[in-house]
Each structure stands twice: as structure tokens, then as C-alpha cells.
Amino acid sequence: MSVCSLLFNGKGLTLFLLGLQLTGDRIQTLEFINPALKAVLDNAVHGLVAGISWLIVVFDHGGRFYCHSGGIYEIAVCACLGSLIDVDHFIEARSLKLKDALNLRNRPVLHSTTLLTVVVASLAFLSVIASSPNLWNWSLMILVAGLSHHLRDGFRRGLLLPPYGSTPPIPYPLYLLFTTTLPQIVRMLFISPQTNESVLFSV
């Protein structure tokens, strides 16, 4: 049995993801932590949630870590993407000051679930046209990084769906359900670089 399988299993990773979100959300309610530190910690949790979610996607629930070539790199990239979405706060504020970025009148563009849907759907379509499993998996990674971020923000402010506005805030239990099942669903669509097959189809 590998070291990874001793440290992790499918259920354990999902429980860890759930605990991470509960902890991160709890931190945001603590009044003794200043807003700037809360923002930094929340962004770190966004990245960790995305990274752990992608780890679940590429994890073999049969008892071993699915460490294909570049797998660790993909986990790190997904974590970075989940965190870097918040850079649009500074772009929208036209300032590098955290105070300005935290006090926006409008939600910035990378928080648009409409835009995320268009980008992911376009990449997925191109991957099918080009018969490219790598491009398909990249579309899934962007989906995991972006949607996990949007769902975490969504339980506080709803999902941003221009041009239709925003949804009501997502009920907290539903938010937790969505974010913990997202990687399980994507895992069924993920194409193995070794076999060019997914749970649902092969190429």
C-alpha cells in the first residue's frame, strides 16, 4: 500500500474538504479578526478548496493515489486558479490597496458564473472538435476552481449571473452539498491520461 493511500482515502478527502470549508466560514464570523486578515484567509481557503477538490478528482478511490504525470502540478494550478479569481477585486477597484478592493460597489467580472459557464463550455466544445483529452481536463479544472469559488461566495451573496443579476444567497446546507459533490461529479468526467477513458466515456 502506498504512502498516499495510507494518508488519504476518498471519503477522508471529502470530509477534509467539508471541514476546511466549515473552518474557513467560521473564521469569517469572528469579530476579533480584522477585515483585511479575514480577506487574506478567505482567499487562502478558496485556493485550498479548489486544490483539494481537484485532488479528489484525480484520486483513485480503489485505494491508491492517482498520480499521473503532471497530476501534482494540476492540483497546484487548480489551487492557484481558485485563489487568483479574487485578483479581479483589485482590477475593478483600479487600486492595489486591499481596502479599496474590499469596498467595491459591484461584483467584479471573474465572479460572474455566466462568464465561467461560457469559458468552460467553449473549452469543452473545442476539446471535442480537436479530440483533445488534455483540453477537456483543463475545462474541468477551470470549472472546479471557478465554481467552488463562486459557490463559497454564493452562500453569502448569491451567484452572479449577468445579464440577469444575482440569485438569492445559497442556503448554507445546499452550498456545502454542492461544493462537496462537485469534485465527485467532475471525477466521472475526468479523462485518464493513461487510458484516455473516463468513468462515463472513452476517446
Image: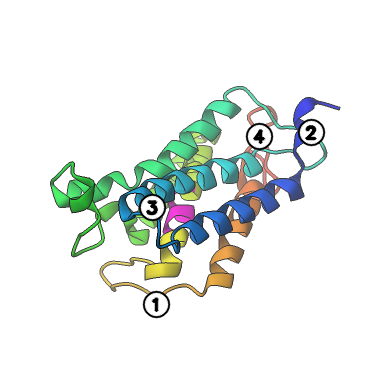
How many labels, in total?
4
What separation in Å lies between label 2 and label 3 (alpha carbons)? Answer: 34 Å
Any part of residue 64 in sight = no
Is residue 36 a member of the stretch shown in magenta?
no
Q: Earlier in the sequence, mark 3 or mark 1?
A: 3
The residue tagged 2 is 5
Which stretch appears magenta? Answer: 145-150
Residue 114 to residue 59: above or below? below
The residue tagged 3 is 38
Give the left or right position of residue 102, taking residue 67 as reference: left
The residue tagged 4 is 192
Q: Which mark is residue 168?
A: 1
Residue 27: image location, x then y, percent: 48, 57
Q: Residue at x 14, y 45 (%)?
A: 95
Q: Nearer the viewer, residue 40 or 196?
A: 40
Any part of residue 21 in sight = yes
**Farthest residue in the left direction?**
94
Graded by Cα atoms within 10 Å as few (under 14), some (14 to 19) or many (20 or more), the crowding at tag 4 reads some
The residue mark sitting in front, 3 or 4, is 3
